[in-house]
Amino acid sequence: MKILIDNGHGENTPGKRSPKWTDGTQLFEWKYTREIAKRVETELRKQGIDVERIVKENTDITLSERCKRANAIAAKVGVKNCLLVSIHNNASTGRARGWEIHTYIGKSKSDEYATIFWNEAKTILPMGTKMRGDWTDGDADWDSNFAILRDTKCAAVLTENLFMDNPEDCRYLLSNDGKEAITKIHVQSILKIAGK
């Protein structure tokens, strides 16, 4: 199975950052997701998984270009042999917290994969971490009309790894424990999907 990693946004994307906290720290989504994507890629390669990041640039790459890159790779290896994982951090009003996973609207193989991610996140994240599920169709993933999910031909999931504008979530994300946990959620889920 070929795993495609999509790290969200770019250094030139407006917003997409936490507030600057009183200790001087700040989370930039483009930088954070690239660090996590690189960690995931490294760990998966150690396990013999065929993995590729579709965005190696630091600048933002359009959604249409991201989908084009993913679809070109999926066409070579076979759509059914491919999974795209898009890594993000969430933001809202500063009060929301928690972890989410999204798939495109309707039932597909992506929903099965999302359930694996959900279960891993629930196990790996610290006890008491809010798990933000949408159970209206019987599973935890949110059905979303995001281009990266809609316009890719292979199975695709998008993770929203806690809220960067919430001080508690952001503090955890920036910690070594937080980075290790977010990496582990992705690695362990993909290993299970790949049958490793």
Image: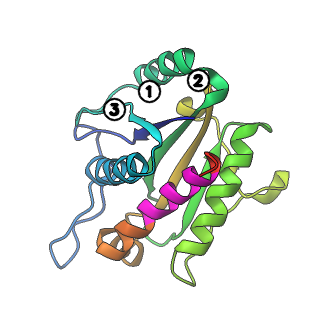
Relative to 111, is 166 above or below? below
Q: Amino acid at mark 3?
A: Val
Q: Amino acid at mark 2?
A: Asp
Assess disc 2: are there few (<14), some (14-19) or many (≥20) residues with their C-alpha within 10 Å of its C-alpha: some
Cβ atoms under marks 2 and 1 closer than 8 Å: yes
Q: Residue at horizontal 82%, vertical 55%?
A: 136
Q: Is residue 26 left or right of residue 89?
A: left
Q: Secondary structure at mark 2?
A: loop
Cβ atoms under marks 1 and 3 closer than 8 Å: no
**Mainly helix, strand or loop, the magenta region?**
helix
Q: Which residue is mark 3?
A: 55
Instruction: Pick whichever of labels 1 and 3 is earlier in the sequence.
Output: 3
Assess disc 1: are there few (<14), some (14-19) or many (≥20) residues with their C-alpha within 10 Å of its C-alpha: some
Q: In which image quadrant can residue 64 be found?
A: top left
Q: Secondary structure at mark 1?
A: helix
Report the span colored magenta. 182-192
CA distance for labels 3 and 2: 16 Å
Q: Residue at horizontal 73%, vertical 45%?
A: 111
Residue 86 lies, in percent from the top left, at: 48, 42
Picture disc at residue 151: 2
Q: Amino acid at mark 1?
A: Leu
Is residue 123 something that shows in the picture? yes
Instruction: Pick whichever of labels 3 and 2 is earlier in the sequence.
Output: 3
Q: What is the count of numbered marks?
A: 3
